[in-house]
Image (cartoon, rainbow, N blue to C red):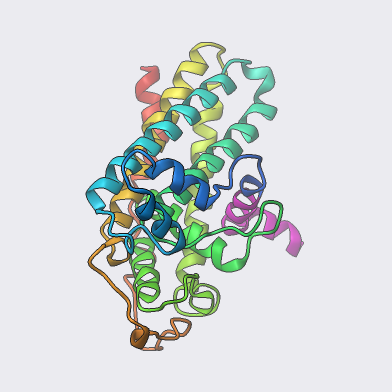
Amino acid sequence: MKQGKEVENPESRFFAVLMAAAKLPGVRIHREAYLRSALARHCSEEEIRRAIEETPAAAGITVELLDKVANDSIRYETAKVSALSAAAGMPGIFALPATVPADLAQYVGHMLRIAQKLAYLYSWPDLFAEEGEGVDDATMGVLTLFFGVMFGTQSANAAVGKVAGMMSKQVAKKLPQKALTKGVIYPIVKKSAAYLGVQMTKQSFAKGVSKAIPVIGAVVSGGLTLSTYLPMAKRLKKHLAGLPLADPSHRVSEGDVVDGEVLEEHETFAPADAELHDADTAAVKLEQRRD
């Protein structure tokens, strides 16, 4: 009984989808290869080398330039995920059991792709280990918070800002493991995962209805994906670009190293249940398109 309840739990459902999407071919972005390719037309070889070895901010690359590169990546990923979603809408109602789960998986996979690209541009560390290895808890936590920012949750915004602040104060280029898995940030990760599990179920249902009629379903499904994915990617970009971690003027000296692992108990965040509901508009948009 307990196991059945866990399967139905929105938090568990979200983590299961996230883990499955992370294992799909082509989802994990190689940080060095991506930065080299994305910055090649805009930066010198020395700037690119330092961006890879340290961070784009440490290389002195301006946020304005990074915004241009980020927009290129967002356009590419949006076009790709929308085309795949439209293709999944072609078979019609008899293929729904196969196409809806596949569409959700590739949608989340492309959310992971753009989240990684934006994170690397705005000076976050490598999020994944070598291809084929599992996803550690800290990475799961920060990706959940990134998704929370994409869906417009205020608590995720606050938590991502706190994690970035901790990282900006330490020389070690890694995620603060304890804060994301045991500290006061962890409850926000769990709250965000539960919220995202509910939202993804709603979006999956809306897309499933749109796929019931071939051809028309393809147009509606692709358009619905475009209308949700694009603003979510832009929302994450705006938030990451505004953090001190992305600021080229920020420099960390050897004497400024802090643990960054443990948060003081008296520190607080914005209420985790103060969620924005803009992601709920997926079903409404579908109805508007069908009217």
Q: Nearer the viewer, residue 281 or 115?
A: 115
- Tell me: 110 left or right of 148: right
Give the answer, above or below, for where 36 lies relative to 173. Answer: above
Q: Give the quarter of the image for residue 280.
A: top left
Give the answer, above or below, for where 251 lies relative to 94. Answer: below
Q: Give the quarter of the image for residue 42.
A: top left
- As for residue 178 lying within the magenta part, the answer is no
Expressed as whole percent of the image width and height from the top left, the position of residue 99 reads: 64, 27
Expressed as whole percent of the image width and height from the top left, the position of residue 54 reads: 42, 64
- As for residue 2 lying within the magenta part, the answer is yes
Quarter of the rendering occupied by the N terminus = bottom right
Q: Nearer the viewer, residue 251 or 29?
A: 251
**Magenta stretch, overall SS:** helix
Q: At x 54% / y 25%, what residue is drawn?
A: 84
Quarter of the rendering occupied by the C terminus = top left
Give the answer, above or below, for where 176 lies relative to 55. Answer: below
Expressed as whole percent of the image width and height from the top left, the position of residue 50 reads: 40, 60
Give the answer, above or below, for where 128 lies relative to 22. Answer: below
Q: At x 50% / y 70%, what residue is drawn?
A: 174
- Count numbered badges in the picture: 0
Expressed as whole percent of the image width and height from the top left, the position of residue 176 reads: 48, 75
Q: At x 61% / y 16%, what residue is drawn?
A: 92
Residues shaded magenta: 1-19
